[in-house]
Image (tube, rainbow, N blue to C red):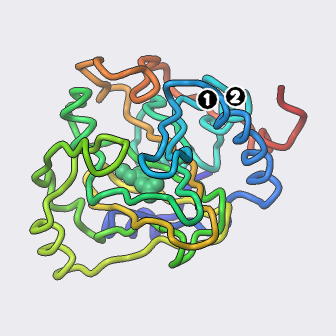
Amino acid sequence: MQISQSQLNDLDRDGFLILRDLFSVDEVAAVRSRLPRLFAENHPGNVIEKESGAVRTSMGLHLRDALFAKLVRHPRLVGPALQVLGEDGYVQQVKVNVKAAFSGEVWQWHYDFATHKEEDGVPRPLALNLHIFLDDVTEFNGPLYFVPGSHKYGEHGSVLDDETTSYPLWIADNQTVSQLADRNGLVSATGRRGTVLIFHDTLLHGSPNNMSPWDRSIFSLIVNPVSNALRKPTRPDFKHHRDLSPIRLLNDDCLVADAVA
Ligand code: SIN
Ligand code: MN
């Protein structure tokens, strides 16, 4: 799948693009059906919330489940990203961020490239983060907040926060967020399950805790150009995969065409 010139312009201007209802309810149900087994595994890629003990994020999923192996090659998800990159991309990171009802915790303000650069030695902020909503995401259950246009300011200051949550993150300082949000406002990315987000590596984003009675799970695939691959492979593979082979797209019906083992 390709996106239009006007969508490309929006992504360039805002740093993110929302593609509503791109995946069907059946496709989302197929993906969701894999989660209970994955979350129950004793796997280092399952990160648990500090307070509640619920799964916060579950990583490396395309190596742990055959349906996720297809999802990371899905043309509706990855086609637009390869179009934007204009070159081959590899699977950098694959996860589901959960944010459970009543207990899902905050993701602090950050931009992804800070981690990619500091932890993995990625040279340039070219990676794209691709999300699929696996629940309806509303104003109540911890949607992502974006500072639109903040990717245009290059790298922002960042420090490692390994205290606030159970997932260490290079976070942005409040002053940077204030300045850019005062100028450009904030957007909260909501939509029905099946909606897709694409966003840039230097876009400031975060999400509040989920005090609602509704779960909010989101699939995330980070695609990085092969030419921009990590130079410092120190983190576990599930945080930045070492297989740099170019993503080759499958058929559009790959999630529902036939039973997947
Ligand atoms: C979230 O799941 O709310 C945060 C996701 C991200 O930082 O990409
Ligand atoms: Mn992020």
Q: Quadrant of residue 75?
A: top right
In the picture as drawn, the residue positioned furthest to the right comes out as 258
Most foreground residue, 260 or 137: 137
Q: Quadrant of residue 196?
A: bottom right
Instruction: Kindly identify which residue carries mark 1.
Output: 62
Amino acid type at image mark 1: His
Determine whether label 1 and label 2 are within 8 Å by CB.
Answer: yes
Most foreground residue, 188 or 209: 209
Residue 236 lies, in percent from the top left, at 39, 21
Is residue 219 depicted above or below 91 in this figure?
below
Instruction: Kindly identify which residue carries mark 2.
Output: 65
Is residue 251 depicted above or below 43 in this figure?
below
Q: Residue at x 40, y 41 (%)?
A: 86
SS at mark 1 in the image:
helix
Amino acid type at image mark 2: Asp
Q: Residues within 10 Å of mark 2 (few under 14, many from 20)?
A: some
